[in-house]
Amino acid sequence: MLVSLLLALSLGAPRDPAPAGRLPAPTTVELRGGGYYGAGLVWDGPAGLVLTALHVVEDMPAVEAVLADGRTLAARVVDREPALDLALVRLEGSPAALAAAPRAKGPPPAGTLVHLHGCPRQRCGGEVLGAVLSPSWRFAGGDYLRIAAAVEPGASGGPVLDGDGAVVGVVDLALLTPGGVALAVPIVLAERRFGAPVALAAGR
């Protein structure tokens, strides 16, 4: 992780005032706390589980989640995987009507157009169009999707969707050199680590 911080820009960010009226996309959740903010994607709607980048939430003394319908719920980290820089967050209260996007069965080939969702500058609900440069690219000990896309701080933890709306990755880092390149954790690695939603709901 130290190497990553030296060579890449972590996309979690200190908090600044959010413009009114900008809310996350249905499968994207804004996570904030302790002056930090980032994004997460609905992992298991009925269980209230959200997947995000670990660095988004690891320094938050308390986590809040802002849903697409404007509700703000308390949340807590229930599982983490530092090797992937991923964490699972469980929403407290009644997170009914959360919808999880389908997840791709394998990595997208080079050239695939993708949509990166997140909360840059606490403005959730927008998206950045990108193209997969490499479906498997080694960096700082990790295996990433390398994507030609200009993302901003606050995008970490948001989903990367293919043209069919399936999640192919989780936004994690932006390379400083060259610019305009984002790295995402492949969703297949997240599923391998955290399991299927039914197993998560029953086992945690």
Image (cartoon, rainbow, N blue to C red):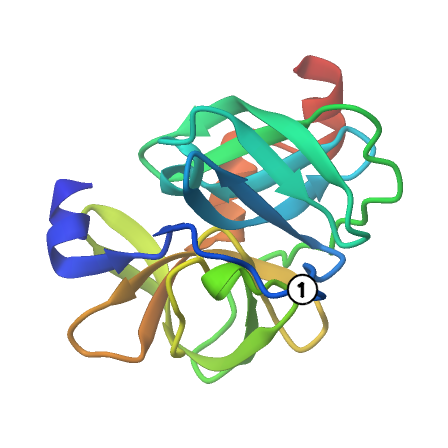
Residue at x-position 48% and y-position 33%: 87
| Disc 1 residue crowd, few under 14, some 14–19, many 20+, Cα 10 Å | few
Q: Is residue 100 visible?
A: yes
Q: Position of residue 106 (x, y in %)?
A: 56, 59
Q: Secondary structure at mark 1?
A: loop
Q: Is residue 63 above or below residue 176?
A: above
Farthest residue, direction right: 97
Decide if residue 124 is on the left or right side of residue 144.
right
Residue 179 in percent (x, y) is at 23, 79
Front position in the image: 62 or 176:
62
Residue 15 horizontal/vertical position (percent): 42, 50
The x and y percentages for residue 51 are 57, 40
Residue at image point 77% right, 28% down: 47
Q: Label 1 belongs to which residue?
A: 20
Q: Quadrant of residue 22?
A: bottom right
Apparent side of residue 188 relative to residue 198 in the rendered image (left or right): left
Task: Give the camera-side residue of 100 and 32.
Answer: 32
Residue 134 visible from this viewpoint: no
Q: Quadrant of the C terminus?
A: top right
As shown in the figure, which amino acid type bears the numbered disc 1? Ala
**Quadrant where the N terminus lies?**
top left
> What residue appears at the point 70 percent right and 60 percent down from the top-left corner?
23
